[in-house]
Structure formats: structure tokens, C-alpha cells
Amino acid sequence: MTHACQQHLCTCFIIPTKILLHFQDQKSALLSERLRGNRDVSAQAFFGGITTGAKRRTIYDAGHTSTLPGSLVRGEDGQPSADATVNAAFDGSGITYDFYQQVLQRNSIDGKGLRLDSTVHFGDLFNNAFWNGSQMVYGDGDGTTFVGFVQALDVVAHELTHGVTQNSVPGGLVYKDQSGALNESISDVFGSVVKQWHKQQDVSQADWLIGDGIMGAESGKALRSMQDPGNRDLTWVGDDQPKTMDGYEEGGDVHTNSGIPNYAFYLAAMNLGGNSWDKAAKIWYQALPLLHPNASFKEAAKATVHAVNLLGYKKVDRDAVTAAWRAVKVLK
């Protein structure tokens, strides 16, 4: 008798519950928590899709309800919509697809040409966006705390990368502890890299912010900074991300502890120099299939160092990656 390997999926939100509670948005926090319980349904939807070799995008409109996927409003060959939110979702998923295809030679998020489905106008003033194991879902924000999500390319790429991770790490990454923080960090890494690639910015030109432009004027500037995790002048007043293992919170929120591997990637990219997608991103991507569901930060660090060898890069590149993980005190 053969047994299928358990696949660890996440209903992964760009806005953690603690931020919603900080801004006293109980409604979005409760809906986000309820949706986290839909993982089994998500898994069935995700693995039931038909794959192909061509880029395919579909955009649905939930009509401010919490029913998915909603009404189909734009397909791959359709004309642009009068709704700018629909077009932003379409364009963002296309740019992310192009990055994975052109830079990493990956055929969509599952590597097999999976159709990219997105739903916009989800919920009533819903302050979140998420990947549910099968598709992207975007709320509109309440216009005060958050002013929307789909307009931020790094948010789109972040959430779609959760799909890449669940299809690249054998068994997926368990969404808690260090493996969960790695899951979030990987999405931040590629969210930032996709934005840099689209803007053609090198590592010194990039802002290294996640969620820049989605927060209202009184809420903050961005969700996270990969260059300086926990710097509230760059992000928002409640940012508690650590930069090194000195600030690691045992059992803490995955969006908090992800600051450590985020900073490691930033340092590695700066050490390597040039464009983040030329070497740093390829190293992190090559490391994904070397991980396991409960991977620790140290195991991820060693996987990236080994990935340098697999890619045939030089000792100076390996030293650059190793130095980054040592700087955040994951490696000694």
C-alpha cells in the first residue's frame, strides 16, 4: 500500500491578525481567522486544476461578499475592464508569472502552467489579501487603515509565491514556528525581487519595503522593511520584527520572526551586489526543494549555501551567503 505525502498548505494573509487588532479592525480580524480554517477545501481546489503551458489569468469579482470565486470579469484574452482593481490584479499576476518564467524558467506557480485565479472586491471593506491554497483574494481595504492591496506588486507577488513554496518544498512548509516564518520570508523575498525586477532596480536602488503604498496616511508607510526589520520610521508604529536571533520570539508570530531570514536575504543580496534576481534570488529558489516541512532557519541557511554549489557559483558567492546568515546569528 502506498501513502500520499501530506501536503502542508497555508491560508496566508499579507496582514497578520495582530496588525488588524492594533488598528481595532475586529471585523477583518475575525474573517481572516475564520478563513484560516479552510485549508482542506483549498487543497482540493488547488490540486484539481488543469494545467497547460501558456499563461492564463482569470479575475473574479466577489461583489463585496465572502463567497469565492465570485463572478468572472476578465480572462486572458479579454479586454481591459473599466474597473482599475480588476486590471491591477490581472497585470500584477502577469508580471509575477513573467518573472518566474523568464528569470527562473518556472511555468506558473506549480511549475506546470497552473491558471492564475484572482478574486477582487472580497468582503465588506476587508483589510486583507491572501492566498488560500488555490487562488489570490483581495479585499479593498477600508480606505483609512488600508487603501487597497492589489495595486502593490510586491503584495501580489508575495501571495502568489506562497503557491510556489507549497509546490517546491516537498510536503510544503508547516505554517508555524521557524518553518512558518521561512514561508513568510520566502514570499517577502520574491515579492521584493519581483518589484525590483519590474522596476529594473539594482540592490542599492531598491527600497526593500513590503507593502509600501497599501497603508492609509495615518497608519504608516509599509508593513515591513527587509533592509532594517523593526525600524518603525520606515514601516508602522507596531513593527516588532527582529533582525537577528537575539530578538527571536519562541512560538512567535510568523510575520514577526520572518524579519531574521528577511534580513539575511537583504545582506546576501547586498554582499553579492548587482541585481537581486541575477544570483541571490536564484540561490534562494534553488534552496526550496532542499527544505522539508519543519525546516529551521539553520537548515534553510545551509540549503542556500549548498544551492550556491549546485548553481556552480564561485567561492566568493558562497562566502557572501554564509556571511549574511552569520550576521543574523543563524550560523556561527
Image (cartoon, helix red, strand yellow):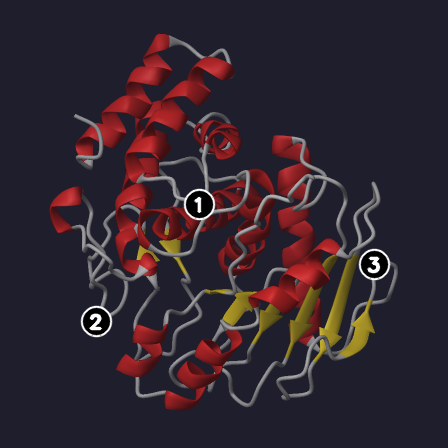
Q: Residue beneath label 3, please?
A: 76
Q: Residue beneath label 1, please?
A: 186
If you read the primary sequence from the N terminus, does the residue marked by circle 2 or circle 3 appear first?
3
The residue depicted at 45 percent of the width and 22 percent of the height is 307
Can I make out residue 273 in this image? Answer: no
Q: Position of residue 18 (x, y in %)?
A: 30, 74
As drawn, which residue projects farthest toward the left? 246
Q: Quadrant of the N terminus?
A: top right
In the picture, measured across the screen, residue 240 lies left or right of residue 32, that is left
- Depth check: 106 or 132 in front? 132
Kind of residue indicated by mark 1: Ile
Q: Position of residue 202 (x, y in %)?
A: 43, 35
Classify 10 Å Cα crowding around label 2: few (below 14), some (14-19), many (20 and above).
some
Q: Position of residue 324 (x, y in %)?
A: 26, 30
Q: Position of residue 231 (x, y in %)?
A: 20, 57
Kind of residue indicated by mark 3: Glu
In the picture, measured across the screen, residue 90 lies left or right of residue 204, that is right
Q: Residue beneath label 2, please?
A: 237
Task: State the separation of the CA atoms marked 2 and 3.
Answer: 40 Å
Q: Secondary structure at mark 1?
A: helix
Task: State the separation of the CA atoms marked 2 and 1.
Answer: 24 Å
Q: Quadrant of residue 167?
A: top right
Task: State the separation of the CA atoms marked 1 and 3.
Answer: 27 Å
Q: Secondary structure at mark 2?
A: loop
Q: Quadrant of residue 103?
A: top right
As drawn, which residue projects farthest toward the right? 77
Q: Are marks 2 and 1 in contact (CB under 8 Å)?
A: no
Whether 106 is drawn above or below 173: the answer is above
Kind of residue indicated by mark 2: Val
The residue depicted at 18 percent of the width and 32 percent of the height is 327
